Image (cartoon, rainbow, N blue to C red):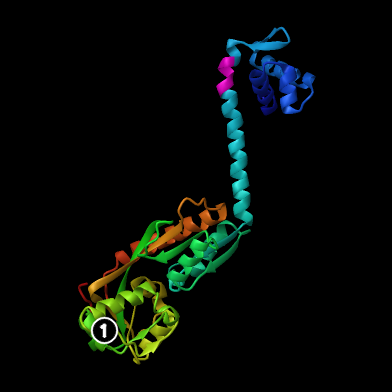
Amino acid sequence: MVTLQQLRCFLATLEHGSFTAAAVHLGYAQPSISEQVRLLERHLDTVLFRRAGRGVVPTEAARALQPHATQALAAVDEAGRAVASVREMLTGTIRFGVFGTARFYLGAELVADVLGRHPGVRVELVGQNSAEVLGELRSGRLEAAVIALPFGDEEVTITPVMRDELVYVSADPERLAAAVTPSDLAEAQLVLPDVSWRDHDTTRLRLVHSVQATGGTLRPRVEVEDAETALEIAALGIADTVTWRGVLHRLGHRLPETLGWVPLRPRLYETFAIVHRHGAELSAASRVVVKLAAAQMRRLDTAIGGTTGQQRRQAEYDL
């Protein structure tokens, strides 16, 4: 049987032209090198080297064997790197950036998915808003993240994974009779999330600009930190809100039964993307979470893209 040791000794002898030089290169005794080559010749039933002065000269059989021996050792080295990569995955710490409502898209399900496949990792989901997460990414404190587009940054590699639609949510059927315009938003009693990030939040800024374009001003009656609290307040009929269809889809049966939704006019979409610093090589642990997060969000993208746009407990609208 041909062994890796025999192939290493053969290639070293071929490269250095003598058993002595090969022994020095590998750190072995010279008799060990010649013995390994002799065993290889016996197994292959051929002569690989002929003596020439103080060295050896390879035969045609040796030249024919050389690429295969090189390939075999390279494959073993690659296998070792693959095993080391798996070992890193099983013990690494994953710090993945997420914006506030990303918990509805990823959150517990992503953590369960990662730990189910790689129970030895540690998981940290970091961030409250896309602007904050992008800053952490630029500083190197995060390797990768999921954030809302658009933003301008040539230093970041962007992989879009999902498009979601912002919709108007209310407990009052009369306010859900038609798509809601920017002028309607200016007049509405609203509860909006992301109060701490309202000056940087991409969704809030797009709403503000759309209302301003009609000559109005967006003046929410209530502001809170998270989307779920905004929905709970809307369910009480105190104020209406806007949120993403993906959030409504993920809440499912947990969404208050009193709530329904209609689209905005013009429709307002936002794209979510996996991002990392341009040219940076992700760790094995980060590659794991990026792959699973992207797959999870693409599944949700398909799910909400195929819905009919029905309002719960309201009439069906052709959206």
Report the quarter where the C terminus lies.
bottom left
Q: Magenta includes 64?
A: yes
Report the quarter where the N terminus lies.
top right
Position of 107 with respect to 50 (left or right) is left
Secondary structure beneath label 1: helix
**Location of residue 280 with respect to 51 vertically, above or below:** below
Position of 178 with respect to 6 (left or right) is left
Tell me where the magenta segment starts and ends, as one range. Answer: 63-67
State the image coordinates of residue 276 (x, y, percent, origin top left).
47, 57
Q: Residues within 10 Å of mark 1 (few under 14, many from 20)?
A: many
Q: Nearer the viewer, residue 155 or 17?
A: 155
Report the residue marked by disc 1.
185
State the residue at coordinates (73%, 10%). 54
Count numbered badges in the picture: 1
Q: Is residue 167 visible?
A: no
State the residue at coordinates (61%, 36%). 77
State the residue at coordinates (62%, 40%). 80
Q: Magenta includes 247?
A: no
Q: Is residue 218 visible?
A: yes
What amino acid is found at the position of numbered circle 1 in the picture? Leu
State the image coordinates of residue 224 (x, y, percent, origin top left).
43, 85
**Location of residue 116 with respect to 239 vertically, above or below:** above
Position of 151 with respect to 54 (left or right) is left
